[in-house]
Image (tube, rainbow, N blue to C red):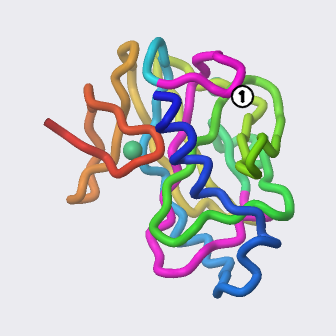
Amino acid sequence: MKKLISAVLCAVLLLSSVSALAITRDFGMVKINEVMASNGETIDDSKGKSCDWIELWNASDDDIDLSGLNLSDGKKNLAKFTFPEGVTLAKGAYMIIFCSDYEQVETLDGGNVEIHVPFKLSADGEKVVISYQDVILDIVRFDQQTKDVSYALKDDGTWAYCDTPTPGAENKFE
Ligand SMILES: [Ca+2]
Ligand SMILES: [Ca+2]
């Protein structure tokens, strides 16, 4: 799984390093793609902790500057986390957000970025919400979750439990 982390983090480029490419702020194309509210052995963060995680997907053909985009686990406080300046999601790429109950945007050795947000996901069911300036752009509600089984977006736009979780990569159902 460590390789997978690298693959994910490589998708997150510092804004300065991609300044030659087209970068939009088309937040409508940032999709919640997969959620895991009970992570046992699926993936660790760089400190070896198995936090809950959210996977975002850039469904567009342009890199997206995420600064100003909000992420939360409910509608009451939409801005529990706001992406800072300098975090870009490459076109077609996937990004993992660790839900660790503390906020940290850390540039790791090699320039990759690891993001932790100040909330957790309840295995009894909760929501994940993306918003910008109080406008909800994407939301997923999930019910009770099983350890190491994710809740993932399918090609047809519906959501399903997935026992082959793919943090940082295209969703796969078997
Ligand atoms: Ca929560
Ligand atoms: Ca995935």
Q: Which residue is located at x 78 percent, y 55 percent?
A: 83
* Quadrant of the image containing the C terminus: top left
Q: Amino acid at mark 1?
A: Phe
Quadrant assignment, res 137: bottom right
**How many numbered marks are there?**
1
Quadrant assignment, res 165: top left
**Residue 68 appears in the rendering:** no
Residue extent of the magenta highlight? 43-69
Whether 45 is among the magenta residues is yes
Magenta stretch secondary structure, dominant: loop
Q: Which residue is located at x 49 percent, y 36 percent?
A: 3
Q: Nearer the viewer, residue 158 or 76?
A: 158
Q: Which residue is located at x 47 percent, y 45 percent?
A: 168
Residue 28 spot, x, y in % from top left = 55, 72
Residue at the disc numbered 1: 119
Q: Is residue 25 above or below residue 92?
A: below
